[in-house]
Amino acid sequence: MMIWYAIPSIIVWSIFLLAFFPGEMSPDSFSHWRQVQTHEFSNWQSVVYTWLMIGLTNIWDSPASIGLVQIVTLSLVFGYGMYRLQKAGIPPLYTWMMAGLFALSPINGIFSIIIWKDILYSTFIFLLSLIAFAIFATRGKWLNSWGHLFLFGFTSLAILLLRSTGIALFILFSILLLFSYRNYLKQIAGSLAGVLVLYFIVSGPVYDYFEVKPSDPNEALGMPTQQIARIITYDGHLTEEQENYYFSIMPKEKWIELYDPYITDPIKFSGPYSAGRHVIFEDLGRYFSNWFKIVMQNPRLAVEATLKQTSLVWQINEPEDGYTNLWPGGIYRHNTYGITQEPVSVELHHRLNEWLVWTEEKLKELIWRPATYLFTVILLTFAASLKNGWRAWVVATPVLLNTLAIFAAMPAQDFRYLYSLSMVPFLLLPFSFLTFQTVDEKT
C-alpha cells in the first residue's frame, strides 16, 4: 500500500526533474561535487552524502542520479506515513487527498531535485516523526519487531551522519522515548547504544581511514558572531580590554561594514575575519568569556541580534530589510565542471518556473516561510494531545528538536534548514482528529 501512495509524488517530481534536468545545484552542491571528483573529503557538507553521490554517479554519471534517489526516498517515506495513518483509522479518501497535495506541493517538487544534503536529512526527520507516530499509535508495541528496530536505527544513524546537530537530536529524542515508554526500555536503550556505536565507528576510524577533514569549528559560532557584530555596530558598551580583543580579530570598521543582521557569511568568509580568527581558536575560553560578558552588558542588542538572525524560524512575514533564500534557481554558473541545466522541454521548464516564482511572490507567507509551519505543528500537536494525552508530543519531537537546533545556530535565512517543518503537518493534521486508547495515562 505504501508504494501506491508514493506513485503520485514520483510521477510529479520526475516531471520536475525533466523540466530542470539534471536538477538544481548551488555552490554548496559543488562543494560535494568537487569531492566526488577529487576524493579529497571534508565533513563540512556531510561526507556521507558525498559518498552516496559517488556511489550513484558511478552508476549514472549525472547529478540527476542523486535527484532521482531523493525523489524515490521522499515518496516512499510519505507513502509509509499514509499507510500508518490508514492503519490508524484515517479513511483512504483523505489519505489519497493528502497524497495528491503532497505530490503537487511546489516545495516538494523543486526541493526533491536539489543536490543538497538537507533534502535527505529532512526526509529522515520526517521518517523519525512517522516512526514516533507508529510507536504512539501502538502504545509501544511497534518496537517489538526486529524489522522496526532496524528501521528506527537506520533512520537515526542517517540523521546523525547527515548533519552535526543530529547526535543531540537523537539522544534527546531517545531519552524522551525511554521516559514515555519505559516498558520498552530494552528495545530503546539497545537501539540508542547500537546507533551511537556505529556513529562513533564511522565518524572515528572510518573517517580517519579516508582522511576526512573535520568541519570548520567556526560554523558553531554563528550566533555569537552576530551578537558581537551588532553590539559593536550599534555602539554597545564595551570595556577597553574587550575592544582590544575584538578589534585584534578584525578592525572595528570591518565589523560594522560586514555585519548583516540576517546572515553570518559576509563576516565569516571575509578576508579580514579569516586573517584574525586565529585569535579566537588560540583561546576559546577567553572568546566565550568575553562574549558572555558583553551579552550581559548589552542584553537588548544581543536579543535583537538573535531575533533578527532567527527570524526565519519564528516570523511569518518576511522582514522588510530581510530575505528568504528558497531554491538555487538553476545550476551555479561559475562551476568548473561544465554542468549546465538542459531541460528536456523548454516549454515545461518555463511553465513550472513561472509557477514557482508566482508562489514565491503571492504565497510567500503561506507556504515559503517556515514559521507558518512551526506554528501549525505546535497547534496540531496541542490538539492531538488534548485527545490523546501528553505522549502525543513525542510525534512532533523530532521536527521540534531540529527547529531548536537551527534556532541556536542558524547561519542564514535558508528555507532548506527547516524543510522538514513543511512535511510534518501532513502527518499531524490527520493525527489531530484521531483518538487512541490511553487508559494507562489516566490511571
Image: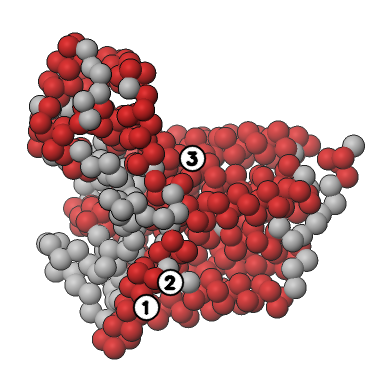
| 400 left or right, relative to 218 | right
- In this rendering, position of residue 366 left or right of residue 114: right
Q: Visible in this render: residue 65?
A: no
- The residue located at (50%, 59%) in the rendering is 422
**In the rendered view of the protein, which quadrant contains the N terminus?**
bottom right
Q: What x and y, as percent, mark residue 183?
A: 78, 37
Task: Find out whether the residues at labels 2 and 1 contact each other: C-beta distance under 8 Å.
Answer: yes
Who is closer to the viewer here, 294 or 221?
294
Marks 2,3: beta carbons within 8 A = no
Q: How far is the residue under mark 3 from the one under mark 1?
A: 32 Å
Q: Residue at x 55, y 51 (%)?
A: 375
Q: Which residue is drawn at 47% across and 64% down?
A: 366
Total marks placed: 3
Task: Identify the mark at residue 237; answer none if there is no mark.
Answer: none
Tell me the element at label 1.
Answer: helix
| Residue 5 versus residue 129 in the image, above or below | below
Relative image position of residue 330 (x, y in whole percent)? 25, 69
Considering only order in the chain, which callout, 1 or 2, is on the residue closer to the N terminus?
2
Tell me the residue that label 1 is attached to.
355
The amino acid at mark 1 is Trp
Q: Which amino acid, mark 2? A: Pro
Q: Mark 3 points at which residue?
A: 404
